[in-house]
Image: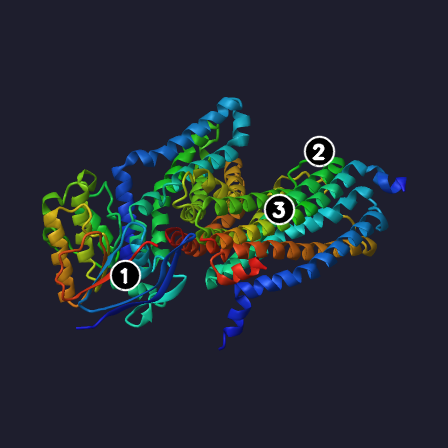
């Protein structure tokens, strides 16, 4: 296990690279969902504004 | 020729619904494949005889680079369709590709630099692949910048579409010219990036990662495109029905 | 004499988020003048730009002699003379030079013809001064000479009489009437009605919602 | 066909005449180029061998940046006063008229830059034998650069403070031109064989002539809408 974690001496490169890619994937998932939710909220706001008066 | 199927297929409410239904079918396989590929690449694949375990960065770098190029190609293709047929949905797809592509270009650049530290002794050398990836990032940023600088959304769609098409013609030229430039200036002893002696146990996880990243891209793009469709169709009746639910 | 016909069919035009034209239709034929009126922001300019094909309607279509204007755009444009809000003139060139270049792109033209057109709009007095030194009204006259010289059956004019004095307004009316008599069509967006005979005039009022 | 040639000739003649009535604007990019190439020896060192090494880079980066200055004005006035609309509605192909406009732009910006580059190169300790090669490479490279710039300029019409955006759009696309252009100049200075990079620059010019006016016309139409 410790051999796996040390990556044959390349741990300081491999793990940050994996973590960074993973972080970017997660961030993209979050950002995509947020962008969709924002568009939906905006559309909903507009619809309720049009129905109100 | 009967084009009604095309129009029905291309209609925003239809594609909005379809994208919503399809998203999980891409997202979950993507998650499984990426985890499996990572496990295979980091734990199962044998170390490279020359680069040791350092080569394992390729399992995150190469798929990111692949995604960054694929996103640009999709973006340009969607932009061309939107420009020629005046199809809002295609512009929505193009608009969603740009941020995803830009982020994975950053991922490819950073992982490439992390690979460079132990191999070259420095985070940055002007390796042709990394240089081309950097230019790609600038192309993405220009596209995003143009889009955000134009206030009228339809004009923004169409102007950025022209830029995407011009850019996609340029991408292979940039790649080639950077390779050529490198071949002239390069000291022969420097190790080129991303060319470990490939064997099947090494390659299989990589291929799994490629498929996983492709599916991931489609899933991300579908989610974003739904939002972009809503933004472009605010006035339509179907939007108020969908949103009211 | 060839009869011409310009029609717009249920045009919907958006400017950004604003829905400026909502299902607008019109039809004009040879010898008719379509006067478009409406307050600021009512969509007069948008309508004219849609008619000439600079703006694409979201839905609906504009047809010239029964064919969509986008089908054979350059054939349509060859029969069109458009005058926008600004007078398309270069400050560093004289009116004569301006017209030689602007009209010459459309058809070959001699200096006699240009001088005649400038005389017609009472611009001979400043035909060889740089446009930079001219007043806005004088520039408008030069731009109108350009419309004349294009020798096109369809005129689309955005506020043709803007900046013009009383004599200039009467001049615009005369030019329009002559174009109608020659079998042409004129579409103009105006604030104040042009002095044109009622007979061939159709009116289109736009209201800002 | 002769009518189309006549139209193109008039577009070029108009732009040239306007430029000569307003010579200051014509000179600004050239002055910029002269100053940039002067700054390098001051920042680096006056030593001839080092200057000669960086001469291709200095010439090409300077040429690229000063072309950007000129490109910013390519469509600006014509868009503001409605001339571009008249081009689009003239019944002539807008692609063709914009190509003519790009030709006049190259005559007014690219060609003078090429003719001036030997002066700058001489200041960078380049031997006079290299000058024909330098003029040729800059002249050929700026053809594609003008065409590329026409597309970006068309896209940024009507954008307030579009100058920085124009650079952001154009420079990444100009990377291949920079690589092959600088290489051609470098070989001219070394007295090497310039054929390969010059072929590439020529190929880019041909590619630009066939595709860029179409893209520029599309961009201008979209920006006017």
Q: CA distance from mark 1 to mark 2?
A: 61 Å
Q: Position of residue C150 (x, y in %)?
A: 21, 58
Chain for numbered disc 2: B
Q: Same chain for marks 1 and 2?
A: no
Q: CA distance from mark 3 to mark 2?
A: 20 Å
Residue at image mark 3: B179
Q: Nearer the viewer, residue B137 or B28?
A: B28
Residue at image mark 2: B122
Q: Is residue B194 shown to the viewer in this render?
A: no
Residue at image mark 1: D2
Q: Residues within 10 Å of mark 3 (few under 14, many from 20)?
A: some
Q: Is residue D70 above or below residue C146?
A: above
Per the image, label 1 sits on a secondary structure element best described as: helix
The label nearer to you, 1 versus 2, is 2
Q: Nearer the viewer, residue B242 or D224?
A: B242
Q: Residues within 10 Å of mark 1 (few under 14, many from 20)?
A: few
Per the image, label 3 sits on a secondary structure element best described as: helix
- Residue C6 sits in which quadrant? bottom left
Q: Nearer the viewer, residue D19 or D163?
A: D163
Q: CA distance from mark 1 to mark 3?
A: 44 Å
């Amino acid at each position: 296990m410790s051999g796996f974690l040390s990556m044959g001496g390349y741990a300081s490169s491999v793990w940050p690279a994996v973590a960074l890619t993973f972080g970017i994937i997660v961030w993209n998932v979050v950002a995509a969902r947020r962008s969709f939710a924002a568009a939906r909220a905006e559309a909903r706001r507009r619809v309720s504004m049009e129905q109100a008066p | 020729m009967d084009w009604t199927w095309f129009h029905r297929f291309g209609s925003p409410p239809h594609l909005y619904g379809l994208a919503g239904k399809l998203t999980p079918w891409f997202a979950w396989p993507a998650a499984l494949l990426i985890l499996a590929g990572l496990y295979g690449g980091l734990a199962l694949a044998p170390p490279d005889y020359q680069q040791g375990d350092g080569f394992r960065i390729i399992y995150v770098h190469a798929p990111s680079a692949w995604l960054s190029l694929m996103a640009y190609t999709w973006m340009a293709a969607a932009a061309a369709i939107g420009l020629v047929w005046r199809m809002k949905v295609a512009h929505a797809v193009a608009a969603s590709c740009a941020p995803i592509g830009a982020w994975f270009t950053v991922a490819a650049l950073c992982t490439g630099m992390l690979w460079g530290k132990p191999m070259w002794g420095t985070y940055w050398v002007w390796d042709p692949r990394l240089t081309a990836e950097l230019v790609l990032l600038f192309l993405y940023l220009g596209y995003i910048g143009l889009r955000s600088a134009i206030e009228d959304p339809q004009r923004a769609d169409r102007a950025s579409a022209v830029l995407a098409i011009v850019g996609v013609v340029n991408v292979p030229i940039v790649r080639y010219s950077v390779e050529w430039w490198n071949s002239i200036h390069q000291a022969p002893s420097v190790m080129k990036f991303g060319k470990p002696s490939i064997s099947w146990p090494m390659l299989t996880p990589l291929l799994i990662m490629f498929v996983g990243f492709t599916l991931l891209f489609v899933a991300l793009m579908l989610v974003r495109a739904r939002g972009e469709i809503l933004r472009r169709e605010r006035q339509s009746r179907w939007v108020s029905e969908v949103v009211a639910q | 004499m060839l009869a011409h016909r310009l029609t717009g069919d249920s045009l919907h035009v958006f400017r950004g988020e604003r829905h400026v034209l909502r299902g607008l239709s019109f039809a004009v034929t040879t010898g008719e003048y379509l006067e478009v009126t409406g307050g600021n922001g009512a969509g007069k300019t948008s309508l004219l730009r849609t008619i000439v094909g600079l703006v694409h309607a979201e839905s609906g279509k504009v047809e010239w002699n029964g064919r969509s204007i986008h089908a054979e755009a350059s054939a349509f444009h060859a029969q069109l003379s458009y005058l926008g809000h600004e007078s398309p003139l270069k400050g560093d060139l004289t009116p004569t030079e301006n017209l030689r270049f602007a009209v010459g792109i459309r058809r070959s033209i001699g200096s006699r013809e240009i001088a005649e057109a400038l005389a017609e709009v009472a611009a001979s007095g400043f035909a060889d001064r740089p446009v930079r030194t001219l007043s806005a009204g004088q520039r408008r006259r030069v731009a109108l000479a350009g419309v004349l010289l294009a020798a096109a059956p369809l005129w689309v004019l955005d506020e043709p009489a803007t900046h013009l004095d009383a004599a200039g307004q009467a001049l615009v009316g005369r030019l329009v009437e002559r174009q109608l008599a020659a079998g042409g069509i004129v579409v103009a967006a105006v604030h104040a009605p042009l002095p044109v005979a009622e007979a061939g005039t159709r009116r289109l009022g736009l209201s800002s919602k | 066909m002769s009518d189309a040639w006549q139209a193109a000739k008039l577009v070029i003649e108009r732009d040239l005449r306007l430029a000569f009535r307003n010579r200051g604007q014509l000179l600004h990019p050239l002055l910029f180029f002269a100053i940039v190439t002067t700054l390098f020896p001051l920042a680096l060192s006056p030593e001839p061998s080092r200057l000669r090494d960086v001469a291709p880079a200095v010439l090409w980066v300077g040429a690229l940046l000063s072309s950007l200055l000129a490109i910013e004005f390519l469509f600006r006035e014509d868009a503001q006063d409605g001339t571009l609309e008249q081009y689009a509605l003239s019944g002539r192909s807008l692609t063709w008229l914009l190509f003519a406009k790009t030709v006049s732009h190259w005559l007014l910006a690219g060609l003078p830059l090429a003719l001036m580059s030997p002066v700058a190169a001489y200041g960078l300790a380049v031997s006079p034998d290299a000058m024909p090669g330098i003029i040729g490479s800059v002249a050929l490279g700026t053809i594609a650069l003008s065409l590329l710039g026409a597309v970006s300029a068309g896209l940024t019409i009507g954008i307030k403070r579009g100058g920085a955006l124009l650079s952001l759009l154009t420079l990444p696309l100009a990377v291949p031109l920079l690589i092959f252009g600088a290489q051609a100049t470098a070989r001219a200075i070394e007295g090497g064989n310039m054929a390969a990079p010059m072929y590439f620059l020529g190929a880019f010019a041909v590619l630009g002539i066939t595709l860029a006016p179409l893209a520029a016309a599309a961009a201008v139409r979209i920006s006017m809408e």
